[in-house]
Amino acid sequence: MNGRSKRLTAEQAIELFRTLGDEDSDSSSDDEFVGARNRSRSRSSSSESDESPSRSSVPEPESAGGEGALPQPGPSSSRGRSRVAQAGAKRRRLDPEVDVSRQTWESVELGARTEGYNFEFHPKNRREPGVNAELNDQSTALDCFLELFTDDVFALLISSINDYASKIQQKNTPARQYSRFKDMKPVDLYEMRKFLAVLLAMGLDHRPEIVDYWSTRASLNTPFYGQMFTRLRFETLYSTILHVGESDAEGKDKIEPFINLLVTKFNAAFTPFQYVSIDEMVVGFKGRFGSRQYNASKPKKHHIKSYGLVDSSTGYVCNVLTYFGADTSYDMTDGDHDGMAEKIFATLLKTIGKGYHIYSDRWYTNFNLLEFLLKREMYYTGTVQKNRKGFPPLFKVMTNKTMQHQESRYWLTGKKHILACAWQDKKASKPVLIVSTNAAARNVTVRRREKPSVIADYNVRMNGCDKADQMVGYYNIHDRKTMKWWKKLFHWAIELTINNAHILYVMTRPEGTNRRNLSLRFFKLKLIDELAAAAAEITPHRDHPPTKPAGRPLSNPVDRLEGAKHIICYVPGDRRCRVCSTPAEKRRTNFVCEGCVDVVPNAPLVSTDGPELQNKGDWVATQFEQLSRYGRLDAFNAVMNQQMSLNQAAKYYKVNKKSLMRRVSGEIPIDASVGVDTALSMIHEQKLVSCIKLMAEWGWGFTSEEIKDVVKDFVTTKKIETKFKDCRPGYDWLKNFLKRHPDITPRKTEQLSNARLLLDSKHLQVEVQHAC
């Protein structure tokens, strides 16, 4: 043949085609195909002999096996099996062999129905369908979430993160300069709840990069994220959620134990109703993953495939099985199953009882699956592919040309335990084929269109997985790009938990509740607030001292306060502060301690048997005013008599240099009062300062605007008459107020720490009320 490939005859090609495992056609169709090819070949041979009698016949192909032997396919260099063989093996897994000789189908008229099985509905553990958790109409969004995301789940998550972080720290010893794990601190329940709150907020507020959530730009700044975490701490926690299992886990063990634990909580909180559906649930992923799937018809063509058992009426996810190829965790307690559909159904249905009606699509439907479910006392309804074995032979030849518009046909098996139906929809290219083990041959009218009741029920009850996928897709976090497939599944599992918690929340609301308050978005917003508030009620247990907040310290060392009776008081003339001042920067204040001897030169201590505490401040202020006035007068006379320079007099008599210069120049009278009008009395301002400092010591700092609001509330509550507009001070007053009290430091909005979450709000409120 001069190196050219030999051409097979029609009979040899058909024989080779049959040996390669084509199981789409049965023996009868093969005989018809062979006969047609023989007749066609005989006609073409006779016509060729008539037209060109001198043409020689085509020689039979030769092979090493002898004359007329079929060529044997050789081994492939890239694959162990050819594509045809692989496709045949896949079909055998989805559509196992069926003893067709025992299956007879009879065409029936309207009114017939399946017989022979009447299963009673018995959920597992004899529980009532619906919500089984201890929830009522007063339960909050957090209560519903914590019924599923229990302390056991938190403990597994926290231990996994800490173990993995410790392992990374050991590998990176000594740590690099900018390593996230250089000063990694263990995570606890307090931080874990805040972390979940931030994740939910990120799902509602999608941004291109994680750093954008901590941006200080006016258009992006959101104080919530900075109050919950620093950016570096969040990124460290985010990167450690890699193994939700053992630190040295590989493959599916990185995430499957976590998902299985959640599924256990799902089933403990809710019992599905009688109608459930099974379908695939996909998570889009384009990274490296051995069991990654590709389906061009899906919105997410590259994805991780999972199978879900979902309640048809609510969309509650009851069970999940993630596909890991040969390592998929199928349930084999009932023995080995021939088909893939039986393995999937046996695994997903182990969490529910008997008498359920399962709905699924044509990818799973085969005759062995129907009998498998009947043995487990469950009904099944699902569409079917026309070439599946064991179903009516007419399924294979039905087209839109053989059936009229809205025409329906029904068949029953000889045992009358399976009903098959074919229905031609309007403008459909092929009829809809469906089988059921609990249905009747009758038509119903849906939106002025007549269709079989089994198809109408299928359309209503098959959308459980689609509804769950739709809800999980709203405001989700698992669409964020990541190179780790198990992190995708972790975020997806979190979204499943929130969706199920939302269903529990909706089902426990009283009738007449506003539907807007039952939306998934509203539920997530409430859950974020309640997670943050719940974290604030937890006192974090730390083996290390808390991180010192950035900026100026809130309080000063207290060693200088020992051994004396210290009572703060106000003096009109400001002076240099002995606490805040440094050689490089001098700070002045109007508040002094009446218990210290060296507050004013040669000033006696205040007697303990003097006036009452509420009047003592006024009395001390009067004494200091007199001493200050005498000091200013002496300094003025020393300068005017040229006994001292201005600087020497101000330093010697401890008076304000600027104030002394203004009196010497004649700008103001000698006996003029010192400083700006305070607008508040000394006692009121002292109480206000005490409250602000007390809250600052507890960790509740204030911004400049918040200090103004505090003054407004204080003035309104005490019914104090001031010159403030609407009882709220302005910028000038605040500036002088902070100058008089340099130990009060306003915080910037973006630098507010999460110390507020550490507070016991009730105890703080009692302390503030007592102080103010």
Image (cartoon, helix red, strand yellow):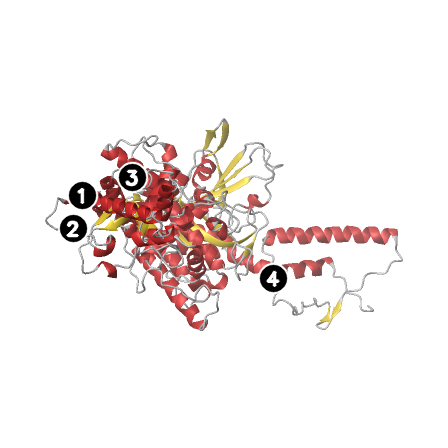
* Residue 188 rendering spot, x and y as whole percentages: 33, 59
* Above or below: residue 730 compared with residue 55: above
Q: Nearer the viewer, residue 428 or 680?
A: 680
Q: Residue furthest right?
A: 54
* Residue 203 rendering spot, x and y as whole percentages: 45, 46
Q: Which of disc 4 and disc 1 is earlier in sequence? A: 4
Q: Residues within 10 Å of mark 3 (few under 14, many from 20)?
A: few
Q: Which amino acid type corresponds to the residue marked 3 in the rendered image?
A: Asp
Residue 309 in view here: no
The residue drawn where x is 76% and y is 62% is 7
Q: Which of disc 3 and disc 1 is earlier in sequence? A: 1
| Tag in front: 1 or 3 | 3
Which quarter of the figure has residue 342?
Answer: bottom left
Q: Which of disc 4 and disc 3 is earlier in sequence? A: 4
Residue 680 in view here: yes
Residue at which label 1 appears:
619
Q: CA distance from mark 1 to mark 2?
A: 10 Å
| Tag in front: 3 or 4 | 3
Q: Is the residue under label 3 in contact with that under label 2 (CB below 8 Å)?
A: no
Q: Is residue 89 left or right of residue 488?
A: right
The residue drawn where x is 48% and y is 48% is 216
Q: Secondary structure at mark 4?
A: helix
Residue at which label 3 appears:
671
Q: Which of disc 2 and disc 1 is earlier in sequence? A: 2
Mark number for residue 606? 2
Quadrant containing the C terminus in the rendered view: top left
The residue drawn where x is 23% and y is 44% is 626
Q: Which amino acid type corresponds to the residue marked 1 in the rendered image?
A: Trp
